[in-house]
Each structure stands twice: as structure tokens, then as C-alpha cells.
Amino acid sequence: MGWVDTHCHLQLDSRPASALLERAAEVDWLVAPGVDADSSRAALALAAQHPERVLATAGLHPHEADSWERQRPLIEELAKDAAALGETGLDFYRDLSPRAAQEKAFRDQIAMALELSKPIIVHCRDAFADVHRIVAETGAGPQTVLHCWTGGTRWTRRFLDLGVMFSFAGPLAFETGETVRLGAALVPPERALVETDTPYLAPPPHRGEPNEPAWVALVGAALGRVWGMPAKEVAAVTSANSARVFCR
Ligand SMILES: [Zn+2]
């Protein structure tokens, strides 16, 4: 059994998707999240080309949240064919859209996910308290995937109580990733997923290079070191979790 890369923006990569998939022989399948209507449409097209290995999501990234009113009907339509909603969430680190707009787009996408009974992929940067409040208020926890989880012990515990899934990415393996590793140590294997966030955040020894799905194995190996579990078992449990979450 191989890996599942639960967050891989294949459609945003300038390299041909087929080449990246071919190089990722150990990756059984992956999830290509949309960040706006156009990229969600592109992800769905990729999924149609590679139905065995690519699932698409439809959503609006918090960076683009100020265009929500215009994109909303498009995302709503695309979401019907998508495996999940997102990526949505809150980014108070870069603050590229006003916070009120980010919260509105996030809440509306959660409502769509609840309506369609689909998972929702959540980006959370410097916004732990607000993401926690909104997920708790909406009751969306059991459908929530926290992508590129970087929380330490305190926030990991609080989010565990909401029933969410935690998806780990390159920062878990960074030299500076001690906080992330302490959080990951608290996550039971049945609540964990792995991802690359291609083309961003390449894990060591590839930092600074464009990331690719094949390197999800490096993230999984890092998680195995945190848990004291062989990489093969990490692959088996996170892949089974991925299949359950994305109904594959
Ligand atoms: Zn992303």
C-alpha cells in the first residue's frame, strides 16, 4: 500500500501533472484543492483526466476572500462535482483579504459542506482561536480537515475535541518544526493525514525546491519518527483515513 497526498495543488504547478504523477509511483492518489473558481475548475478537469489518482475540491482561499460574493455562485456549482469544499479558512498572518471577508467566505463554505455532506479543507494561519470558534459554532468538526497543521500541544488538544482531522505537511520535518512535532505526538493515528501542499513547502532535503507529490513519503516518515512507527504503517493508517474522509 502507498501514500495519499491530501493537499497537492497539481493544477497550480507549471510542470505537467502527468509527469509529477508518474514520478510519484508510491502515491496511490491525491487531492487537488481549488483556491478560487478557475483553479477549482482546473482541478476538476485534472480529476477527469486521471480518475484513478486525482480528486478535486472546490473552494476559495482566504487570500482571495474579498472576491467571495462574485465567486460564490461558481464555487457552489463546482462543489456539486467536487470531493470536498475548500480550501477555505483564515489567514491572519498575511491578511491579504479583510478579516471580516475571510470569516464570511469561510462560514458560507462550511454551510455548503454541511449541506452537501462533504469534507471541508481548512487553512489556518495565525488564526487558531477564530478557526476554532467558527468550527465549534457550526458543528463542522467531524467534516473538517485542518490542512498543513502547525499547532502546538495546546491548540492540537482543543481541536482534537472538535473531532477534526489533522493533515501534516513539510513543516513537520523542518529543523524549526519542534512545536509542530509536539502537537503531532498528541494526534492519534486514526486522526492524521499527510500532504505535500505542492508546489509549496518542500520537506528536507528539498527545501526551497518546488514541492511534488512523491515527497509526501518524507512527511510520512517524519510523522513516523514522532510516533515511533515504521513509515509503512504510517502510510497504511493515513491512507485508510484518507479513503474514509474523502469517501474513496
Ligand atoms: Zn493549499
Image (spheres, helix red, strand yellow):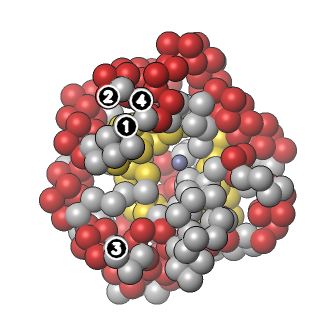
What is the quadrant of the N terminus in the image? bottom right
Disc 4, disc 1: CB below 8 Å? yes
Disc 3, disc 2: CB below 8 Å? no
Q: Residue beneath label 3, please? A: 177
- The total number of labels drawn is 4
At mark 3, the secondary structure is loop
Front label number (3 vs 2): 2
Disc 3, disc 1: CB below 8 Å? no
Q: Give the alpha-carbon distance from disc 4 to disc 2, as whole Å.
A: 6 Å
Q: Callout 3: 10 Å neighbours few (<14), some, many (20+)?
A: some
Please, what is the three-letter code of the amino acid marked with disc 3? Gly
Left or right, 215 with reference to 22: left
Disc 2, disc 1: CB below 8 Å? yes
Q: Residue beneath label 1, please? A: 95
Cβ of disc 1 within 8 Å of ligand 1? no
Give percent across and percent down for residue 96: 43, 35
Q: Give the alpha-carbon distance from disc 4 to disc 3, as whole Å.
A: 27 Å
Q: Residue beneath label 4, please? A: 97
Left or right, 203 with reference to 34: left
Give percent across and percent down for residue 4: 59, 62
Give percent across and percent down for residue 188: 30, 67
Please, what is the three-letter code of the amino acid marked with disc 1? Asp
Q: Quadrant of residue 110?
A: top left
Please, what is the three-letter code of the amino acid marked with disc 2? Arg
Q: Give the alpha-carbon distance from disc 3 to disc 2, as whole Å.
A: 27 Å
Give percent across and percent down for residue 159: 23, 50
Front label number (3 vs 1): 1
248 or 5: which is nearer to us? 5
